[in-house]
Image: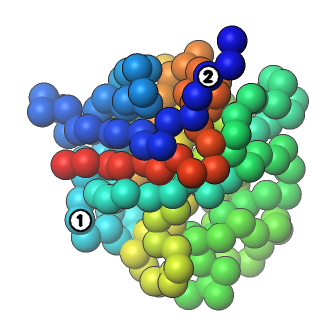
Amino acid sequence: MKRTCVNLILVRRSPLDRRRGRLQAGNLILPCAIGRSGTTRTKREGDGASPIGYFALLQGFYRPDRGPRPRTGLKLRPLRRQDGWSDDPEDRRYNRLVTLPCPTSHEKMWRDDHLYDVVVDIAWNRGPIRRGRGSAIFLHLARPEFSPTEGCVAVHPRMIRRLLERIGPRTQIAILD
């Protein structure tokens, strides 16, 4: 069955638990985990909050050893073992994909857990990139207990493929307070 791409994904914070929310993509409504500090309008590196605003979805990555390529209209590429993401505000490559080994602080994209088996880059702190304003804000897989993220949006692993089928190159995500 062919699905129409949605233009906007809404993420609304739960009134009962600031670390959880609901993600809506058209008629698909999913529980999600958000940052351990809830949401914020003044995002800073390491604050554990999800940034409030409207953002493009830039590209996606998937682990080819953990499942087939997901169907999506979004630009998507397989992760490599040497992929990392710079989270060092002093690095000229801050908030960008880097090749490992990397001498500065970074996050490994090829993880032992399953959180980044499928991951989408949310266009937070881009154009221009402002040092210290937060990096690596992704849409990724949730932990089994839906524990909070470091600022990302996370959905159940069984639902990510259904969500990706609804995402296209013009889809935006809105993280609301």
Q: Vertical placement of 149 versus 45: above or below? A: above
- Depth check: give the residue in front, 93 or 125: 125
| Residue 132 marker | none
Q: Vertical placement of 125 versus 146: above or below? A: below
**Residue type indicated by callout 2:** Arg
Q: Residue at x 63, y 50 (%)?
A: 169
| Residue 3 marker | 2
Horizontal and vertical percent for residue 130? 46, 83
Q: Quadrant of residue 88?
A: bottom right
- Depth check: give the residue in front, 150 or 112: 150
Horizontal and vertical percent for residue 64? 86, 34
Instruction: State the colouring used for the structure image.
Output: rainbow
Horizontal and vertical percent for residue 45? 41, 70
Q: Residues within 10 Å of mark 1 (few under 14, many from 20)?
A: few
Q: Vertical placement of 176 versus 132: above or below? A: above
**Residue type indicated by callout 1:** Arg
State the residue position of label 1: 41
Q: Vertical placement of 149 versus 40: above or below? A: above
